[in-house]
């Protein structure tokens, strides 16, 4: 999309209201495990009331709560849950994710219709993302037990992280009966399938889920050639499982039951640092499986999602360089970056200036390789994050730095890893974290090791 076209569409979107975002109507992520949903990944998920879906299965998306947020948008008011975009726009960003999402092909054609609908109308979304299951064999650094059995098993073995009264990674999972949500989903899916332009399956890890096979069988009979089928996978599987998976997708394409297939995978850095952040990942297996999918399913759009966090800064440019090597052979591989919101003590904007400089070097390197290997959309998203990260937030008296220190200490213990061996460029940051602890009156968590004052630390190490 040209800059002129994007500007024209943005003006049309803002003419409805300066806070209008089509994602609130046309996009939904539904967590069938925990009974929650949200539209767009920035707002927190909210509960799907059982009494609402008992009457109307479309309340999996059209909850009363969400309708009230739509009303605010139509009135030109800013829903507080959409704070990321308001921050971007207040920082001077012309194209926040509100505009980027609203101009996506599954959203923008619906603008005229949606702008004229009553705020409390039930809407068939065009983009549905479903979390079918929480089965996962990874235990990623910022993931939670309510969406990953891998993290849940770790929590069962070790208990919560004692981080200043913060039970990180425990999540809010309750033992609930999933049946009402699954029942509503299977009633609702046949009703909306012909309106769907994108059906996206996430997890957990979908390739481990029995429910995923049910979706594939449903599409064999009810899919259509206008549908883009999307799967989120960590791509950590051996070759045989990947071949079985790609064979099934190939069959749907040849039957005309889906018109297009897209695959999203996640990695937040390069090599050993990426494996540290996403415990269970083998970086080489991931890269090899990207090549495997491209070879077995030619034309597949494969998106590498990078959730940028404080630990991404050490190897972000290395990841970009690896992606360029892939893009030389498979230009359908693209990058989608977002920033980590929770937990706050792993956010980018707690970084020291020397680490943030790495982000800006990576951005400059990406600019130098645009448009040859990266497009303007990819570049804009990283530029937005770089702009946001320049607003430092270490909390009251460095609270987030102290939390980071306690978390990494415990994470290393559980994973039998050594943070500074894997992230040597973070030595200065680690010293700053220690200094904040020493200068704080805060009482350390029970069982935590004593901290040596920064002034007493050797200058050549920690």
Image: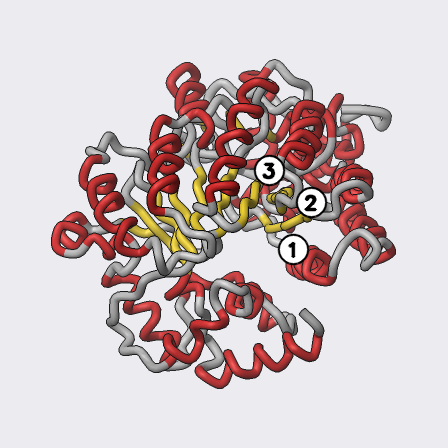
Between circles 3 and 1, the one closer to the viewer is: 3
**Residue appearing at x 13%, y 50% in the figure:** 54
Kindly identify which numbered label has been placed on residue 333. Answer: 2
Q: Can I make out residue 146 in this image?
A: no
Tell me the quarter of the picture where residue 388 sits.
bottom right
Q: Is any atom of residue 200 visible in this view?
A: yes
Of tags 2 and 3, the one toward the viewer is 2
The quarter of the picture where residue 355 lies is top right
Quadrant location of the N terminus in the rendered image = bottom right
Estimate the x, y position of residue 430 in percent, counting from the top left: 71, 33
Instruction: Assess whether mark 3 and mark 2 are in contact (beta carbons under 8 angstroms).
Output: no
| Residue 40 or residue 156, whichever sits in front | 40
Indicate which disc, 3 or 1, sits on the residue closer to the N terminus. Answer: 3
Residue topped by disc 3: 266
Quadrant location, the C terminus: top right
Q: Mark 1 points at which residue?
A: 392
**Residue in the image at 64% along x and 42% along y:** 304
**Who is closer to the viewer here, 13 or 152?**
13
């Amino acid at each position: 999309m040209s800059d002129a076209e994007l500007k024209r569409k943005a003006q049309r979107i803002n003419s409805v209201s300066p806070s209008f975002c089509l994602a609130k109507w046309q996009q939904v992520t539904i967590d069938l495990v925990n009974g929650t949903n949200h539209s767009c990944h920035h707002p927190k998920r909210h509960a799907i009331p059982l009494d609402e879906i008992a009457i109307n299965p479309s309340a999996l998306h059209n909850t009363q709560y969400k309708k009230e947020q739509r009303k605010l948008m139509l009135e030109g008011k800013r829903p507080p849950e959409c704070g990321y975009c308001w921050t971007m726009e207040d920082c001077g960003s012309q194209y926040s994710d509100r505009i980027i999402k609203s101009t996506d092909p599954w959203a923008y054609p619906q603008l005229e219709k949606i702008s004229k609908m009553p705020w409390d109308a039930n809407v068939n979304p065009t983009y549905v993302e479903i979390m079918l299951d929480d089965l996962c064999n990874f235990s990623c650094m910022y993931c939670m037990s309510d969406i990953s059995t891998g993290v849940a098993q770790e929590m069962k073995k070790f208990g919560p992280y004692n981080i200043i009264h913060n039970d990180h990674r425990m999540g809010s999972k309750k033992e609930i009966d999933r049946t009402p949500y699954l029942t509503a989903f299977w009633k609702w899916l046949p009703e909306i399938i012909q309106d769907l332009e994108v059906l996206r399956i996430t997890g957990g890890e979908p390739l481990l889920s029995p429910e995923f096979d049910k979706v594939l069988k449903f599409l064999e009979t009810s899919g259509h050639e206008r549908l883009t089928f999307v799967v989120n996978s960590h791509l950590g599987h051996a070759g045989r499982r990947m071949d079985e998976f790609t064979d099934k997708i190939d069959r749907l394409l040849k039957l005309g039951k889906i018109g297009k297939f897209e695959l999203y995978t996640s990695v937040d850095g390069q090599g050993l640092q990426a494996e540290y952040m996403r415990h269970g990942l083998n970086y080489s297996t991931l890269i090899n499986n990207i090549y495997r999918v491209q070879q077995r399913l030619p034309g597949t759009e494969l998106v590498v999602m990078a959730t940028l966090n404080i630990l991404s800064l050490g190897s972000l440019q290395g990841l970009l360089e690896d992606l360029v090597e892939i893009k030389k052979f498979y230009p359908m591989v693209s990058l989608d970056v977002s920033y980590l919101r929770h937990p706050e003590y792993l956010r980018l904007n707690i970084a020291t200036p020397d680490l943030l400089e790495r982000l800006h070097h990576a951005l400059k390197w990406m600019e130098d390789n645009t448009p040859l290997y990266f497009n303007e959309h990819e570049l804009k998203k990283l530029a937005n994050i770089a702009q946001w990260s320049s607003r430092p937030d270490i909390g009251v008296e460095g609270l987030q730095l102290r939390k980071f220190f306690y978390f990494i200490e415990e994470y290393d213990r559980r994973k039998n890893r050594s943070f500074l061996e894997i992230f040597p460029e973070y030595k200065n940051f680690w010293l700053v974290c220690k200094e904040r602890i020493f200068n704080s009156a805060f009482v350390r968590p029970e069982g935590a090791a004593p901290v040596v004052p920064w002034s007493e630390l050797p200058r050549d190490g920690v």
